[in-house]
Image: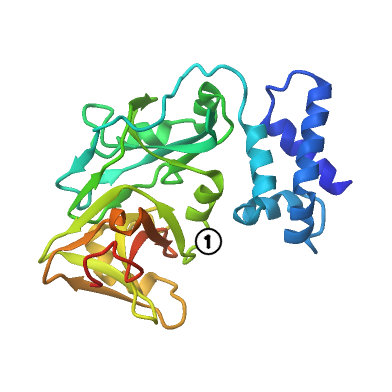
Amino acid sequence: MIRLMFFLLLAIALRCSVASAEERLFEVYRIAKACAGDVEKLCAGVRPGDGRIKACVKEKVSQLSPACLETLLSAAVSDKEPSLKLNPGLTPGLQVHTPNARNYAYCEIAPIIETSHGIFAQFYNTTGTIGPSGGCPAAAFAAIDAKKLGERLSTKIVYMNPTPQSARRHWVMDENWVFAAGETVDFDGVAATWMASMSPPMLLSTIAAPMTPVEIHRQSKYLYRKGSQVFLMRTPDGKAYVMQSYATEVDKSLTFEQLPQLGAKLKLPAGWSFEAKTLTEDLTIDPRNANGVAHIIRDSLHNVYEGCGFDAACNYVP
């Protein structure tokens, strides 16, 4: 009964577009059937009441089974015609090249919407956009109401990166290329270009707990030039994660100039180390050389790194 009440509240909150009581009850039953086992497994021992079960599920959402997650997301996506129509996907021949990427501020807007291929998070990135709404204007991004934007897109879930939206995220490499890009859309004063489509389980894995290694697929290339400083997390088995972006999500005062001393602020697993290193030769990270696989990890301050030493994506391990 407790689980049913939780999912009842969740379903009503997610899918207010469902018209009839009969449809709402069917939605509740569908979610409860798909997710009851997850709640029992992940929240065993959690005392019901005061939102504790709901908080538990939210905290462990990245551990939900694919069947439960897909059911929840299908309830979050409305069948109502969106007032802001997106056309995500690759535009043949379109690429985004940023020749001066170091300390370049950017943000991402990723609504979870249903397409003919299923339910996916569609990532729109501000890198390379120009004009008054280009380059992730701080005030405009912070002012976006994700809930209202979701209503225009007919979804209840719009992932905003960085979060909170008052934070900033910056590239760290010297130059980058994105080889798969599509339309550019103005999201309430923030222009962003489609650059990726990601399944919900993969999206959840990328924002999982800090220091959780994940694999994603991307068509990009990063260049760190000879003489530039790179910021590395080294593993006990000789691999190196190279910082690709830093953010002020956790440490609001973090700046690029502080990155060489970042190790003192990080919570690293036993045997790991942080290092700031000046390159003696160019370093390139190109997942296309490894079947498109990129090895990604976030540190305890939500800075993001890409791994070298796993495959042929990097031209060497720095």
Does residue 167 appear to the left or right of 112 in the view shown?
left
Q: Residues within 10 Å of mark 1 (few under 14, many from 20)?
A: some
Camera-side residue: 12 or 139? Answer: 12
Instruction: Give the amino acid at mark 1.
Output: Ala
Give the residue at mark 1. 209
Q: Residue at x 42, y 37 (%)?
A: 109
Q: Residue furthest right?
A: 1
Is 262 left or right of 12, judged from the image as shown?
left
The type of colouring in the image is rainbow
Q: Nearer the viewer, residue 286 or 246?
A: 286
x and y percentages locating residue 262 in the rendered image? 32, 69
How far from the left and from the top, in percent, is residue 291?
35, 55
Callout 1: helix, strand or loop?
Answer: loop
Q: Residue at x 33, y 27 (%)?
A: 183
Residue 24 visible = yes
Q: Position of residue 241 (x, y in %)?
A: 33, 68
Specify whether 261 is left or right of 8.
Answer: left
Is residue 189 at all visible to an observer of this figure? Answer: no
Q: Residue at x 19, y 41 (%)?
A: 97
Q: Is residue 131 above or below residue 239?
A: above
Q: Image quadrant of residue 236?
A: bottom left
Task: Give the vertical position of 273 relative to 156 (above or below).
Answer: below
Q: Position of residue 3 (x, y in %)?
A: 82, 47
Identify the image quadrant of the C terminus: bottom left
Relative vertical location of residue 93 with respect to residue 19 in this rendering, above or below: below
* Total numbered labels: 1
In-front residue for pair 294/227: 294
